[in-house]
Image: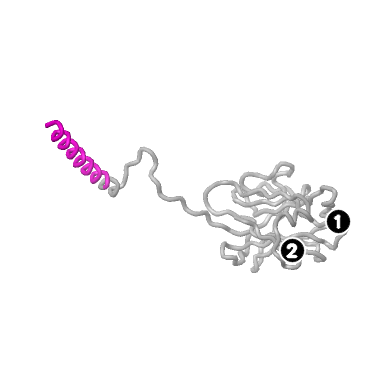
Amino acid sequence: MSITVYDWQGNQRDLAYLRGKYGNFIIQEAAEGEGPAYKIALLREKVSTAAALVVRVVDDQGQPLPEVRVAWYWPDAPGDPKAGPLGGVPSGMTPKRCETGRTNINGDVGFGMGPGAYYWPDQGQTGLHATWIHGPTTRSDLILGLGMVAATNHDHFDVEFAYVEEEELPDVQGPGECPTEEILAELVKIERQVGRIQQAVDNIRQLLAG
């Protein structure tokens, strides 16, 4: 799913715009598998704002999802053996560490950021924070490299996840399985037609031979 990006003035941008200002953050896609997944749908820039990053969770129609448990990571975060997500965290992160918060009726949860969240993108740095939807069996995108740009008034970008239902695979019969009655009926028709064609060919050959 494509990710929509808005700058602080509400103009639609792209990921290159954010990376140009906030460094080379990493987006790890949800682990492959069956069933629903949480995908990053939107990133929204905030400047001269509160020292808090807001994570929003919506359904596939854009409606807010309350009571969703969201993970918030930094290297010294508390240990959490059920942090997730399914498939693990990117290289360089310490697994099974995060604090969590639950979304409110608007689908939002905010995580405060202290002085340690500041970093210098122009020096090749990225933020120490990451976020995803909590749970060891949860299929969730993960974004690493979050924080606030140094020497700004808490400039950062917020994250929105969408709960996406995977499309069901068509019911295709595998090798060795019996075909349906409809397929058998069609095969019988084809065999009869082939028999008629073969009989016509034999008649033509007899006429030519005579």
In the figure, is residue 124 to the left or right of 3? right
- Residue segment shown in magenta: 186-210
> The disc labelled 2 sits on which kind of residue?
Asp
Given residues 210 and 34, the one toward you in this image is 210
> The disc labelled 1 sits on which kind of residue?
Ala
- Residue at the left extreme of this rendering: 210
Residue 202 pos. (x, y %): 17, 35
First in sequence, mark 2 or 1: give its number: 2
Residue to which mark 2 is pinned: 7
Give the colouring mode of the picture: one colour
Residue to which mark 1 is pinned: 150
Q: Is residue 40 visible?
A: yes
At 59% from the left and 48% from the top, the residue drawn is 137
Label annotation for residue 20: none
Instruction: Find out whether residue 33 is within the magenta segment.
Output: no
- Residue at the top extreme of this rendering: 209
As helix, strand or loop, the secondary structure at mark 1 comes to: loop
> Would you call the spot at circle 2 few (<14 residues within 10 Å), some (14-19), or many (20 or more)?
some
